[in-house]
């Protein structure tokens, strides 16, 4: 069956790239999910600055960072879970729970740093429960985490009696986890950037990241080659819950108090929306942590900008919802185009 | 070259009331490509699944490298060097070619932090695919950008790279165009020359079998009814056998109980 003589790989690589009619910008949009969301963010900043000149004021940027950084940290974990093809609805409740675990540990005489570790540990336990129920009992994670969402919320409200508490710690710990500089939440911003960079690295450069993508991309195939899909899913649920716990602890140090009603479904939805706006597909198998970070920033810019423009909270939610829908539609379209081989 | 890679003795398989295999004895030599032909429902896939450790046989024996073995699971078979190429290929669409080639056997720059050694995996994948004459645009493209034939070739190449001693391919050219099939057949022919692998290919296309196989077995009604070197037989001879089977079946329908 002789057809054409076999060509080697190197030969085909040497063929010049086919000219692209889309141009540089078009290619960037198609091939880098992050680029499109970054440009959208810049356009929004320019727009809001022109309608409300206080937008780029120091104090307003500080506001924006407070909001976006917290969401970005949670979104990093949510993105990992979504890439495995699952969903974590409970992460916002872990955000509220962790500071209380830390606080009660402190009250019981546990050293401050160890108390923080216990707070994160509470997150890990929740993640483990979410993962085990989802994987071992084969319950859709949507259901599993809907259940734990209510359980954790009830638990936090019960142990706190519904009242705020004020954690203690050395000034150094306050500075590291909740430090402000001239009214600017510098430590939170740094944590968000570090976590985003770390998780992007894990996702793209490590075996864990590769197996996470494989599990979400082709569950059966991943299992057939011997990837431990249960371990991957459970591990990512744990990472997600721990990041939720960490975000809660950071906020607790920043404002020097823990609120049992903080976070919740609102933060979970925003984190998920950030992931999706950033280019992560809810179907699993594909996603980006940097995209989720930029998604959180865009979401922050939108809420903040509309508030400054005097749009009422109700109207704002409508606009926000529409904005999320539009980005999702664009995302799905773009990923279909990408799958079809770019600018054909 | 006359050493035996795999042999079965009177393998049978019963699924409830269906007897899929009655008395199957096959013999696969090292470095040999064996074509397994047979009608739909003849039991070809069942035989392959027994050899990959997926099904337990109802009776009979399997010998591998001269030793009688009992396959406990697919991973047990794989650990021995019996590599199936799955129908779904077990490739990850969203992941590039070279990472798929090393999936679950990744090379790492740093073992502790499990940081992937992309450069080395890329180099080795490129080298290996080139050796096997697998023609793809680049090892950097995602699997989703490749054609069905290219994917199949990657899956075969990956199994070979995993140090397969026996490679089991169930209908690798099913639903494939002429050009794509040719590429798979090229890869298999390449295998024969470079790697010391024994291959069983289940096929429905006689031309494909005569193109790459050293020997051909015909499976009819759960039994091997024909076993000959491809050099010593012809498409015509095989066609006649199958035609004969068809006529008998027709007689059975028209005059039941004869
Ligand atoms: N898991 C199974 N359970 C019950 N019957 C099966 C199963 N697998 C195959 N069979 C039956 O065994 C026979 C042989 O099937 P198969 O090996 O798939 O044939 P082929 O691959 O040659 O077309 C068929 O009658 C089929 O219906
Ligand atoms: Mg079959």
Image: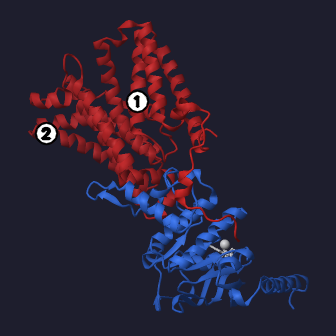
Chain colours: A red, B blue
Residue occupying the point 36% across, 38% down: A76
Which image quarter is the C terminus of chain B in? bottom right
> Secondary structure under badge 1?
helix
In the image, A154 versus A16, the foreground residue is A16
> Mark 1 — residue?
A294
- The chain letter under disc 1 is A
Tell me residue B153's x, y (percent).
Answer: 58, 64
Tell me residue B109's x, y (percent).
Answer: 30, 57
Residue occupying the point 55% across, 61% down: A8
> Secondary structure under badge 2?
helix
Tell me residue B239's x, y (percent).
Answer: 80, 82
Residue occupying the point 50% across, 40% down: A281
Q: Is residue B55 visible?
A: no
Q: Quadrant of ligand 1?
A: bottom right
Q: Are marks 1 and 2 on the same chain?
A: yes
Label 1 crowd (10 A; few <14 / some 14-19 / many >=20): many
In the image, B2 versus B14, the foreground residue is B2
Q: Is residue A274 left or right of residue B85?
A: left
Residue occupying the point 40% across, 20% down: A301
Q: Are marks 1 and 2 in contact (CB under 8 Å)?
A: no
Instruction: List the single residue furthest toward the right.
Output: B254
> Mark 2 — residue?
A113
Q: Is residue A90 left or right of residue B29?
A: left
Distance from Cα at disc 1 to Cα at disc 2? 31 Å
Disc 1 under 8 Å from ligand 2? The reply is no
């Amino acid at each position: 069956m002789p057809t054409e003589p076999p060509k080697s790989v190197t030969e085909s690589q040497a063929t010049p790239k086919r000219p692209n009619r889309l141009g540089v910008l078009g290619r960037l949009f198609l091939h880098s999910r992050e680029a499109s969301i970054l440009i959208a963010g810049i356009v929004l900043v320019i727009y809001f600055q022109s309608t409300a000149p206080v937008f780029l004021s120091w104090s307003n940027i500080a506001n924006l960072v407070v909001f976006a950084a917290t969401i970005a940290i949670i979104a990093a974990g949510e993105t990992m879970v979504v890439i495995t093809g699952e969903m974590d609805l409970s992460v916002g409740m872990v955000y509220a729970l962790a500071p209380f675990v830390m606080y009660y540990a402190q009250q019981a005489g546990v050293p401050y740093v160890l108390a923080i570790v216990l707070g994160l540990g509470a997150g890990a336990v929740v993640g483990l429960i979410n993962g085990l129920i989802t994987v071992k009992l084969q319950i859709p994670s949507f259901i599993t985490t809907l259940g734990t969402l209510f359980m954790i919320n009830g638990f936090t409200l019960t142990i706190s009696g519904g009242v705020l508490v004020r954690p203690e710690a050395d000034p150094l710990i306050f500075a590291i986890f909740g430090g402000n500089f001239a009214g600017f939440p510098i430590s939170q911003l740094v944590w968000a950037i570090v976590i985003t960079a770390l998780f992007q690295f894990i996702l793209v450069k490590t075996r864990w990241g590769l197996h996470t993508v494989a599990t979400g991309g082709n569950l059966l195939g991943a299992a057939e080659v011997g990837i431990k899909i249960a371990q991957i899913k459970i591990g990512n649920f744990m990472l997600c819950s721990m990041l939720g716990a960490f975000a809660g602890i950071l906020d607790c140090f920043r404002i020097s108090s823990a609120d049992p009603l903080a976070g919740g479904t609102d933060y979970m939805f925003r984190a998920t929306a950030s992931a999706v706006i950033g280019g992560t597909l809810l179907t699993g198998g594909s996603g980006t942590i940097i995209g989720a970070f930029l998604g959180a920033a865009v979401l922050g810019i939108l809420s903040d900008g509309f508030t400054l423009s005097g749009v009422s909270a109700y109207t704002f939610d409508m606009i926000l919802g529409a904005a999320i829908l539009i980005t999702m539609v664009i995302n799905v379209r773009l990923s279909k185009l990408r799958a079809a081989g770019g600018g054909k | 070259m006359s050493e035996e890679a795999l042999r079965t003795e009177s393998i049978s398989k019963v699924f409830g009331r269906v007897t899929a295999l009655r008395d199957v004895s096959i013999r696969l030599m090292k470095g040999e490509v064996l074509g397994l032909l047979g009608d739909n429902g003849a039991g070809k896939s069942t035989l392959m699944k027994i050899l990959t450790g997926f099904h337990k046989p109802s009776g009979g024996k399997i010998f591998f490298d001269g030793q009688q073995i009992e396959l406990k699971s697919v991973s047990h078979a794989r650990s021995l060097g019996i590599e199936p190429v799955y129908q779904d290929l077990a490739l990850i669409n969203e992941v590039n070619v070279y990472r798929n080639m090393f999936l679950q056997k990744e090379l790492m720059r740093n073992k502790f932090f499990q940081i992937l050694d992309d450069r080395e995996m890329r180099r080795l994948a490129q080298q290996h695919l080139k050796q096997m004459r697998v023609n793809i645009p680049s090892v950097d493209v995602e699997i989703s950008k490749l054609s069905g034939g290219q994917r199949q070739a990657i899956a075969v190449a990956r199994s070979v790279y995993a140090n397969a001693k026996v490679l089991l391919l169930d209908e690798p050219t099913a639903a494939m165009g002429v050009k794509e099939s040719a590429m798979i057949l090229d890869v298999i022919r390449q295998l024969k020359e470079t790697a010391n692998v024994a291959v069983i290919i289940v096929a429905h296309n006689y031309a494909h079998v005569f193109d790459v196989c050293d020997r051909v077995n015909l499976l009819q009604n759960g039994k091997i009814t024909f076993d000959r070197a491809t050099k010593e037989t012809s498409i015509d001879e095989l066609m006649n056998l199958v035609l004969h089977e068809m006529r008998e079946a027709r007689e059975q329908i028209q005059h039941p109980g004869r």
